Image (spheres, coloured by chain):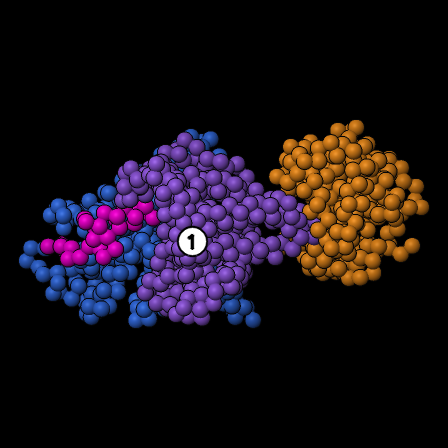
Chain colours: A orange, B blue, C purple
Amino acid sequence: MSTLLEIRGIETGYGRIKILHDVTLDNASGNIGLFGPNGHGKTTLLRCVSGLLRAWHGEIRFDGQVITNLPPRRIVERGLIHVSQGNRLFPDLTIRETLRLGAFPRRARAQEAQNIERVAALFPKLRERWSQRVRTLSGGERQMVSIAVALMSEPRLLILDEPTLGLAPRIKDELCDAIKLISQAGVKLVVVEQDVEFLLDLADHLYLINHGEVAAEVRPGDSMNHEAIMEMYFGRQTSALT
Amino acid sequence: MSMGVGIGRREITGMVVGAVVLALLPMVVQDSYYRHLLIMVFIYGIVASSWDLSLGYAGIFNFGHMALFGIGLYTYGLATTLLGISPWIALLAGGVLAALAAALISLPILRLKGIYVVLVTFAFGQLVVQLIISQSDYTGGNQGLVRIPSFHIPGHNLMRDHKLGFYYIALILLCCSTVFLRLMVRSRLGLAIRALRDNEEYATSRGISISRQRLITMAGSAVFTGLAGAFYGAYFRNASTDVFGASLTTLLLSMVLLGGISTIYGSLLAALLLTIFSEMIAGLGAWRPIVIGVLIILVMLAYPGGLYGAIAAAARALRRLGRRQASP
Amino acid sequence: MSTIVDIVMSGLFQGSLYAMIAVGLALVWTTIGVFNFAHGVLMTVGAYIAWQLASSDALGLPIFIALPIALLASAAIGLLMQAAIVRPFIGRPDVVLLAVITTLAAASIFENGTLLIWGPRPMQLPPLAAGTVKIMGIGISAHQLIIILVTPVILAALWFFLTRMRLGLALRAVAQNEDACHLVGLNVAALYGLAFGLAAALAGLAGIFLGGFTFMSPTMGSEPLSKALVVVIFGGLGTIAGPIFAAYIIAFFEAISIYFIGFYWTPALLFAVLILTLMLKPEGLFSRRSRSLA
């Protein structure tokens, strides 16, 4: 299985402050999981992949083609869809309007009706609130809308940046099930998540991002258990402290 | 820059030297045209640096500033022609009325934010114009006021001194205005208005009253603007609604912005450069505002931080060059 | 009776003009977050381009051919203006202030450019339709009647576009969250251009309406712009519906005030009411706190 997303030697940051130092992720198979302490470059890497942030150095390939520093809409058109953290979305649009907007890429328009049905089946809760403004939704519902919008754009690779941030456990489970279904339908995932349990559930290949670098990785064959990950995570942090 | 209260010794020295140089300048500059240029620089300098107080220091998006100038102008014109009041008293009345108008306009904007302040102050300017035009029996409407009496100094003819008298009157106004503005921004009030601009919530939590500070700032920025307007009337001996127009507003606004906001001296420097440039191309007619407009846009595109920002950038580059040469 | 018809007709006519201008201002504000002080001169330019095409002293094309060309030209000018003097400042914290100065400068450039090209002599556009129509004993020009009837249709079409069509939804989305727009694959720069171009076309149309009714001059846009300012202060800039309601309310207020108090003091009265309203309700009569269209 060839890798859908290849990242080689990416360096980037904000203004003059460099956040990522030579990040390479080119051997991933299956769903990718990123973890690591906050503020160490996970979101920055995702923003760089989806074109929101310019890469200073390095190369990003999607399905074999170079997409480094393309405008975000060109990247969206190829089927790489980024669901960003926080999900402010468009507070004054209704769910239905937001989903229509998701089908903006030309490739996705033909499938719009079909995708709406698919999304509604995946998130039955949303269908009840079809013409409600997004600002009136709960955090969990808003997260569902974010993922639903992404599905409307016919993704081949879905980037999820901390999808369960601040959600109640029950909603988390619901969301995790939905995301699994999406993955089973053939959409590859890149997931950033603090909840290790959740991450282990979804991702095949894990990378620890620390100080703007890939500090460690867990390949699909490796034994991945909760403790080992926690040790990797916190072991590094405590060693950094001492 | 220290955040202390009051004007520092070095600055006072600088002010005195500047004032003395300007006071001696007419001995070198004998030509009345060049004296006229300097008078215009002084007038626009007063207006632009006063605008900097409200727009730059206090962060009040006041776009009715030229209306305050116009109010000073028409107060002087109407007071001297209709009421026959002494020009010197009418000059003061121009400043007082402009300050009152500024206080009045502060009332509705005290609770407003951002763009709405722009709109209300801009609309205020438009209202003043419409009132002046509609009351044409008194104001001359679109034709304007003509043959406005000028100042009278016993034993001196202001019309036949190659503009020396007007030069000194304008210079005195400029000096008073600059000292006044610097005192205001270096006072406790000045610190408070800057604190409000930079962090409203924090400042109010420390007991700074928004309303009172904004009212005082607006009135303060109006006093010498109104005086300058009145002086303008006495100098040109006519008044027209052109002073409210987009061309002059843009010119003055660009002095504030090119000077770099929150730098009273920056607006004075920009007033010097832009007034001279604008007067030099006065022969271009309708092309003049076009050239100025294009120039302003180009400078804003190249240096959105203003002329001061450009100078600072140049100074940095020079220093870097100097270092490189010093350490080969 | 005829007085009432007179006031109603005048209110509807002025209201249509104000609404058309104010909607364009609100469109640009909500999507791009800047206030366009050149909106008034875009009216002027639209009217003069139409004159160049339609006047018997110039090309002499029929008005219904001249009109769409003039609107396209206005939209193109708006688009270029956006790219040259607004777009470069997007993303800066002081964008509002910078855009005020650059659009004011553009207003000055276009006003004087019009003066250079067409001269100060007042001119008149051919009306959209000739003749007068009698309504309840009051004669009203066919031109005015068309404006009264067509404006609500155009505003409704704009509303339909913004709430029912995907491109319109995209415009509203840009107003709300730029980053999220990038991530659903919208061309944000093009949407900014579209908002500005559309607003400029609306301004041009208002200019053509006005030019067929009163004399045109290079400064013809400044008075309607100042009225539109009052309208958007009243109605709030945050929505499209707010300024439309406010436009008609203010036009009726003016019509009544002119009848009872007189032409001269009406602006002052209007402004006094405005100040009072703002002291009681600082965000405008119909506005919400956020920027959003429709």
Task: Please provide percent x and percent y for residue C181.
Answer: 66, 49
Q: Is residue A8 above or below residue C13?
A: below
Residue shown at the point (71%, 43%) measured from the top left: A99
Q: How many marks?
A: 1
Is residue C198 visible in this depiction of the protein?
yes
Left or right: residue B107 compared with residue B35: right
The secondary structure making up most of the magenta span is helix
Quadrant (top left/top right/bottom left/bottom right) for the C terminus of chain B = bottom right
Q: Residue at x 48, y 42 (%)?
A: C244
Residue plotted at (60% across, 48% down): C161
Pick out the residue farthest to the left: B155
Q: Secondary structure at mark 1?
A: helix
User: Left of B155 or right of it: where is C92?
Assistant: right
Q: Residues within 10 Å of mark 1 (few under 14, many from 20)?
A: many
Amino acid marked by disc 1: His
Residue C234 painted magenta: no
Q: Is residue C239 left or right of residue A2?
A: left
Q: Which residues are magenta?
A: B125-152
Picture quarter containing residue C40? bottom left
Give percent across and percent down for residue B172.
Answer: 21, 54
